[in-house]
Amino acid sequence: MATDSVIPPPLRASKPFLNLIRSLLSLSADELNKIAEAVTTKDGFRVSSSALAGLRGSLGKPAPDLLELLSVCGFLYDSALSEEVTDADLVRELLELGESLEVEIPDDKVEALRSLFKPNPEYNRDRRRRSASEQAMPLLEQVSLHCDLRAVVAGPGRIEGYVPVVIARLEFDEPIAGQGAIVVQISQVALARLETELAAMRDVLSGVEQELGRRLL
């Protein structure tokens, strides 16, 4: 059931949130349009580092401030999607907040806000895909590999040589047994086996893509 609101009352009463909204609505129409152009990708408001650098230069805003603005915009956009609120309703709510915050919003800025929060089909599709693939189980988000050297001790005070050991740090999107990351060691034999299995899995995924074609998101 669609709702007619995306900004919950607690946020409407939150001073930090309202300050961010004031900063957003205080941007010029040209600045809003520059942000809208940068976020029209499958990443949406989670812009790449290069796009962020470009925006920072064109808007003249420090990275932390710009990241906060993009973060609140992304939150509003995602919340509107989740609550089935239209972009027009979201802009209407922002205009109401702007009026209460006494921020002047001329017609060209209203159009820029509509452009900023217009539906992004590519991002929406990727978001649905990620939601389906990441649910139910912890998601492995990052793997960091490092080479450690272990001393081979031949006797008291005598080191015969060293053996390389791969250390893998596995980071997940949620705690595993209370830990945000798990660190394991991988032998050279296991590393070679892992490379073979990864290559085999890439072949499987390629076969699935060929088999299902357009049915895949």
Image: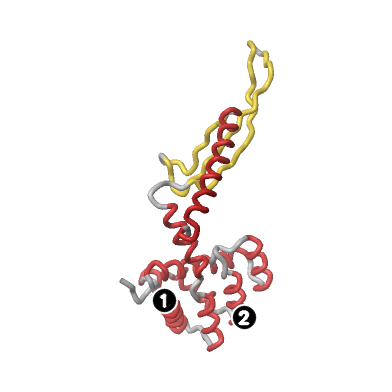
Is 181 drawn above or below residue 119 in the view shown?
above
Label 2 SS: helix
User: Mark 2 = which residue?
Assistant: 30
Is 23 drawn above or below residue 125 in the view shown?
below
Q: Which amino acid is tagged 1? A: Thr
Q: CA distance from mark 1 to mark 2?
A: 23 Å
Q: List x then y, in percent, for residue 82.
A: 39, 66
**Label 2 Cα neighbours within 10 Å, binned few <14 / some 14-19 / many ≥20:** few
Is 171 drawn above or below residue 7 in the view shown?
above
**Residue lying at the far bottom of the rendered structure:** 107
Q: Nearer the viewer, residue 13 or 53?
A: 53
Q: Residue at x 58, y 64 (%)?
A: 47
Question: Residue 67 bears which disc, if any?
Answer: none
Q: List x then y, in percent, for residue 151.
A: 64, 21
Is 213 drawn above or below residue 173 in the view shown?
below
Q: Nearer the viewer, mark 1 or mark 2?
A: 1
Label count reads 2
Q: List x then y, in percent, for residue 116.
A: 53, 75
Q: Could you tell which of marks 1 and 2 lies nearer the N-terminus? A: 2
Question: Residue 86 bears which disc, if any?
Answer: 1
Q: Nearer the viewer, residue 65 or 190?
A: 190
Q: List x then y, in percent, for residue 147.
A: 64, 33
Picture quadrant of residue 108: bottom right
What colour-coding does the image apply?
secondary structure
Q: Nearer the viewer, residue 24 or 200?
A: 200
Relative horizontal placement of residue 22, taking residue 8 as reference (left or right):
right
Q: Which amino acid is tagged 2? A: Asp
Dots 1, 2 in contact, CB < 8 A? no
